[in-house]
Amino acid sequence: MKTSGQVLVLGGPDAGKSTYLLQLYGRVFDGDGQVQLRGAVDSMVAIKDGLTRLASGRPAGHTANGTETSLTLPLVDNETGREWDITVPDYAGEDLRRVGDALRLPDRWRDLAATSDHWVVMVRLSLYPDMPDLVSRPVGLLASASPEPPTGADAQRMPIDMFLVDLLQLLKHGRAQLGVVSDLRVTVVLSCWDELGHADGTMPSQIVHNQLALLDSYCTTTFGSGYRVLGLSAQGRALTDADPAVEFIDQGPGAMGWLVLEDGTHDPDLTKLIAAE
């Protein structure tokens, strides 16, 4: 089986995956970033309601359990001229959690792993305060510590970095089962960066190294130069139904949100997260 330039976006409940997909569509549709649309999109069903909510200053809706839709975008890289189609599957974060907990890949997930050559792993670190550092902290300290359990819909039975390492190993094994040996890129994205309160210039890799050390160590060893870490604030701020954000209504969602690049600089071009390299 051959890969097709597909990006597989992985994220648990409330990680910000759906919001990023909506903002990504808006960016490539406007054509102001590094990547833009080169043709019509087959279906807008999966994103129409979410775009309407963002444009009214309200948060995008949560993807329902059992949802298995895909958004295919025909793209062109403005810098390299490369043309490719990217298919971004949409699914509920709870569905991803069940895949990881079961430690067995359904056929759909095996195919997604095999046909993609770039995996984007979204982690909303604010859901996991005081993450234990399993690599750099002594085992004795971890054993004696009693951290507060994570809250929110994405709480796991194991630390999030352990869960993600297991998931990546599972997906990588599924890819190999179908005979795929092509290079694989992995981008760990600290989503909802605006919630973390880091000073300007903070490099996302420093945060992952310190707070998701097991995941960072695994990705560094396994994927080498194909591994990178970025920050993402897809909205730039929190949104609520009770108090719609006026700036979203006045300026539009396309003016909101930013990436934190590897060197810590902020960039409003959200398409760089999935741009071809």
Image: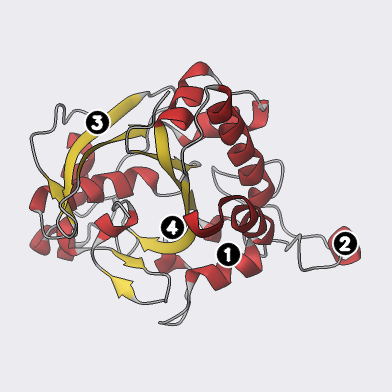
Residue placed under numbered mark 4 in the picture: 191
Q: Which dot, 3 or 1, sits closer to the camera? A: 1
Tell me the crowding category of disc 4: few under 14, some 14 to 19, or many 20 or more residues within 10 angstroms, Cα based: many
Q: Distance from label 4 to label 3 (Cα)? A: 21 Å
Residue 19: where, in percent of width, then height?
31, 48
Can residue 138 be seen here? The reply is yes
Residue at point 41%, 40% (across, down):
117
Determine whether 179 is above or below 228 in the image: above
Residue at point 47%, 44% (across, down):
184
> Mark 4 and 1 residues: CB-CB less than 8 Å, in contact?
no
The C terminus lies in quadrant: bottom left
> Mark 2 and 4 residues: CB-CB less than 8 Å, in contact?
no
Which kind of residue does numbered mark 3 sit on? Ala
Residue at point 63%, 38% (across, down):
169
Tell me the crowding category of disc 3: few under 14, some 14 to 19, or many 20 or more residues within 10 angstroms, Cα based: some
User: Mark 4 or mark 2, which is nearer the start of the sequence?
Assistant: 2
Which kind of residue does numbered mark 1 sit on? Val
Tell me the crowding category of disc 1: few under 14, some 14 to 19, or many 20 or more residues within 10 angstroms, Cα based: many
Which kind of residue does numbered mark 2 sit on? Val
Numbered circle sitting on residue 139? 2
Q: Secondary structure at mark 1?
A: helix
Identify which residue, 254 or 221, lies in the foreground. Answer: 221
Q: Secondary structure at mark 2?
A: helix
Q: Secondary structure at mark 4?
A: loop
Numbered circle sitting on residue 46? 3
User: Mark 3 or mark 4, which is nearer the start of the sequence?
Assistant: 3
Q: Distance from label 3 to label 2 (Cα)? A: 45 Å
User: Mark 1 or mark 4, which is nearer the start of the sequence?
Assistant: 4
Tell me the crowding category of disc 2: few under 14, some 14 to 19, or many 20 or more residues within 10 angstroms, Cα based: few
Residue 31: where, in percent of width, then height?
10, 54
Residue placed under numbered mark 1 in the picture: 208
Residue at point 65%, 51% (across, down):
161
